[in-house]
Image: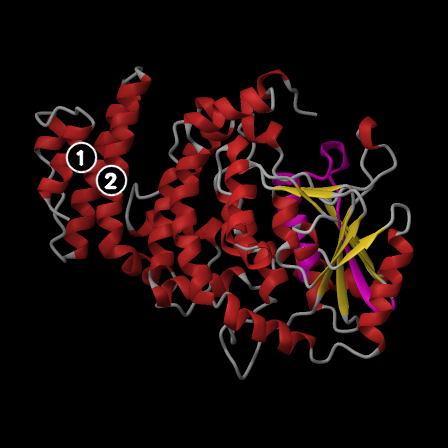
Amino acid sequence: MNTKFFQDHCEKLNFNLDNKIIKKFTPIISQDFEKDKVNFSSFWKECEDENKKIKDKKEKKKIRSLIEITKKIFLNDYSHNIYNRITNNKNKFVKIDELVFLANDVVPYLTPSEEELKIESKKSLKDKEGIEIDQGLFLSAVLSNQLEGNHLCHSMLLPSELALEKQEEFKKVKKVQFDGASIKKFEKHVLVTIENGEYLNAEDERTLLPLEAAIDLAILDKETEIAVLRGEIVKHPKYTGNRTFGAGINLTHLYQGQIPFLWYIKRDMGAVNKVFRGLATEDYGPENSLFPLQEKPWIATLDTFAIGGGCQYLLVMDHIMAENGSYMTLPARKEGIIPGMANLRLWRFTGDRVARQAIQNGLTIHSNSPEGKLICDEIIEKGNMDESLAKTIDAYTNSGVVGSASNRRAFRIGQEPLDTFRKYMSAYCHDQAYCHFSDALIKNLEYYWDAASRKVK
């Protein structure tokens, strides 16, 4: 990356190259990390100071764009240096919510400070400055490096602190009630329940860590052979007395600015990936063939619908029991965001064309349709789910599930090795950051969801 590249970018933005900040900044990588970080950090600070003085949104966005392009230039060469300093050359495991702040200790102004994010968190999505995009750029760059990226994936597969805090309680009373999820232990299986019934079991900040902790506890439990994921009975008048598997991301909270950018990354590198890959230990990571991860097969009960993130969870399940009349959707087109890992996984079930129709054109997949049966293993008549679930659990466990983990791992090697996941996540961190703060997302939420008129409960 050289000065001409930077100048071309400025010209595309119609940005004045005689600007006093730009005139004294040379965006050249000298291969001297200490020298370059001072040069780039000083530029970012001056740009941010300048931005605070500007009221015009278009001009503020131009400066934000300059900050972002120079951070990409810098991170393209130095992301591995930063990560290795934070993790003591990959000898320390740091999860992403801490990693993005520690990056500033190595390179000042690389990512937003905690104080800046506290201010941003009080704004609705359309009023945010978009400073969290810098977190996406940093994580994308780290994940683009094989060694550092795989180490970060390893970190995110370690059991959560919340799960470890509750592990003794779970052993004693065989259940844990979190705020947003629960786990209960039975003779042969553990039941994890998503509990956000007021929002049709949508996922948001309330459910994120509790659901991951419940998944951790389910996998850590050595006395059960199989895990089940369900949604609770919801409180919406249209579905009174019914369960829903999941309504995707909480669009009301999203519009109100209550879901930060890191939510997407923590969810897909944490809870969802743990269902798919299992739990790591500090000594052994996801690609160690002699010391494989701790994991168990998962069953999902698709009650009523699985929208967005709910459908994404189905794509990492070993067995799906779908209520007759239920359906799946990935309404990415009507939202303007990337539906998690669905682009990586859905086509393996349905083929490319159906996957594109679902993600890009809003196709509804009914569970008992030909396409739905490519995803779902059983179609259960309404009212019979509990009885059928007990029979399916017995069928899996009566003959033992000793080979299940090995077979799951064998499928992953062929379908989605860690490097494939890591590369996808690198692109996802970058692109989802821009989607999350796009004008299109705001317009879509207002048009399709009537988000401006909805109140947060």
- Pick whichever, 234 or 33, lies toward us: 234
Residue at screen point 11% across, 54% down: 30
- What stretch of residues is rendered in magenta? 187-216
CA neighbours of label 1 inside 10 A, class few (<14), some (14 to 19), many (20+): some
- Residue 202 highlighted magenta (yes or no): yes
The quadrant in which residue 32 appears is bottom left
Q: Is residue 178 visible?
A: no
Is residue 92 found left or right of 178 in the rendered image? left
Q: Position of residue 382 (x, y in %)?
A: 87, 45
Which corner quadrant of the image does residue 27 belong to?
A: top left
Please identify the residue farthest to the bottom as the structure is shown.
Answer: 290
User: Compared to 33, does 294 lie above or below?
Assistant: below
Residue 69 bears which disc, if any?
A: 2
Q: Is residue 272 above or below residue 199?
A: below
Q: CA distance from mark 2 to mark 1?
A: 8 Å
Q: In the structure shown, which secondary structural element does the residue marked by tag 1 occupy?
A: helix
For mark 1, what is the residue? Answer: 9
Residue 304: horizontal and vertical position, in percent?
A: 77, 41
**Amino acid type of the residue that numbered disc 2 sits on in the rendered structure:** Ile
Q: How is the image coloured?
A: secondary structure
Q: Nearer the viewer, residue 403 or 294?
A: 403
